[in-house]
Amino acid sequence: MSDAVGVERTPDGRYVVVNGRRWRATDPRLPEEVAARLRRALMAARRDVGAALRSGDAEAEAAARRRVHAAKVALGERGTPWWEQGAEERRERWEAGLAELDA
């Protein structure tokens, strides 16, 4: 199974396959506006990791990596698999991630 941008998904939809490597897919039940906010936060945090690495700022790097992790957990790509969570747990996961990233 593939989506419009050519990312292959496993038949159960739980993983995407990129260059032969399997990665956990984003929770498909995330409201699109929430998913978009989390993706923006993830990309900003990844940019900040790079900037911190270039400047040699270990403290900034650690903070940016924590934000990357928080965004990935909120998206359902890390932590308890989204398919093992009920609807309420999933909602709590992304709301907690947004609260942490917006702080």
Image (cartoon, rainbow, N blue to C red):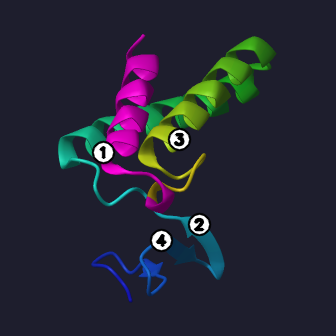
Quickly name the residue at label 1.
35
Look at the picture and state if 1 lies above or below 99. below
The disc, 3 or 4, on the residue closer to the chain's N-terminal end is 4
The magenta region covers 83-103
State which mark lies toward you, 4 or 1: 4
Residue 90 disc label: none
Q: In terms of sequence position, does the residue under pointer 4 or pointer 2 come before the other? A: 4
* Cβ atoms under marks 3 and 4 closer than 8 Å: no
Q: Which mark is residue 73?
A: 3
Does the stretch in magenta take in 92? yes
User: Distance between the Cα atoms at labels 1 and 3?
Assistant: 12 Å
Q: CA distance from mark 4 to mark 2?
A: 9 Å
Cα distance, mark 2 to mark 3?
Answer: 13 Å
**Cα distance, mark 3 to mark 4?**
15 Å
- Circle 1 packing at 10 Å, graded few (<14), some (14-19), many (20+), is some
Q: Amino acid at mark 3?
A: Val
What is the number of the mark on residue 14? 4
Q: Position of residue 18 (x, y in %)?
A: 56, 75
Q: Nearer the viewer, residue 62 or 70?
A: 70
Locate the C terminus and report the quarter of the image it occupies.
top left
Q: Quadrant of the N terminus?
A: bottom left
Give the percent coordinates (x, y) of residue 28: 32, 60
| Other residues around mark 3 within 10 Å, as few (<14) / some (14–19) / many (≥20) | many
Q: At label 2, which amino acid type do we have? A: Trp
Which residue type carries mark 4? Arg
Q: Residues within 10 Å of mark 2 (few under 14, many from 20)?
A: some
